[in-house]
Amino acid sequence: MLSKGNGILVKEYRRSSKNKTIKESTNKAKINIENVVASATIADKLNIKDISNILDEAEYEPEQFPGVIYRLKEPKVAILIFGSGKVVCTGAKNPDMARFGLELLTQQLEDAGISVIRKPEITVQNMVATWDTGHTFDLNAIILSFGLEKVEYEPEQFPGMVFRLDDPKIVMLFFKSGKVVCTGAKSVKELERAVDIVGKELKAGGFLS
């Protein structure tokens, strides 16, 4: 059962999540965020055994994992809760989704009489996104264009080419299908900037129209 405060948060989440898309980058890229990992410290310490009994859908098997795994239905995320007071949200499709999940958790704990930081500082640790370029790639040709020192490609071990950007510090995995997986971004702006930078390099090499 949601408390009044929990219900307000869920309604706010529903309103904010409508029509939420990543702004189109300058090279008209199609970018989809697949996962956002965010963390916060909500207390100096937590009794996670008690918390596992309080929260519905909470899993606690200390012999397998040192924290509580709490799965929310809305927003659909999983939150890892540790005795140190640290919580990690994973599975969000955008940073706001992660923030709402963590805020909903702190309100539920507060409603249960557990002392927590009501508005903790939330830090995005990683964003994973896919970029559909709409073109197939000749990875060997891209390697020559980008420079051997910038890439890793061992097709007998892994089918993708690994490209590391220094600024922003993001790793991109290129596949022959034209799909690119981006990881390491801390914000949507970093992600968009990385795609813009690499998109321009691909255009300059004749790999994108």
Image (cartoon, grey):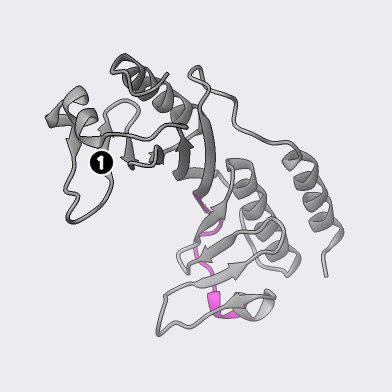
Give the side of residue 57 with respect to residue 45, left or right. right
Place of residue 180 in the rendered image (x, y in percent of width and height, measured from the top left) = 39, 39
Q: Image quadrant of residue 5?
A: bottom right
* Residue at image location 69% in from the left, 36% down from the top: 20
The one of 183 and 49 positioned closer to us in this rendering: 183
Q: Residue at the far top: name it.
A: 204
The one of 84 and 201 positioned closer to us in this rendering: 201
Q: Which residue is mark 1?
A: 162
* Residue at image location 26% in from the left, 50% down from the top: 159
Place of residue 203 in the rendered image (x, y in percent of width and height, measured from the top left) = 36, 17
Image quadrant in which the C terminus is located: top left
Give the side of residue 135 with respect to residue 58, left or right. left
Examine the rendered structure and indicate whether residue 73 appears above or below residue 17: below
Give the side of residue 15 with respect to residue 96, left or right. right
Examine the rendered structure and indicate whether residue 40 appears above or below residue 63: above
Amino acid tagged 1:
Val
* Residue at image location 62% in from the left, 67% down from the top: 71
Tag count: 1
Task: Give neighbour class at mark 1: few <14, some 14-19, many 20+ (Cα, 10 Å).
Answer: some
Examine the rendered structure and indicate whether residue 97 appears above or below residue 208: below
Stretch of the chain drawn in magenta: 37-50
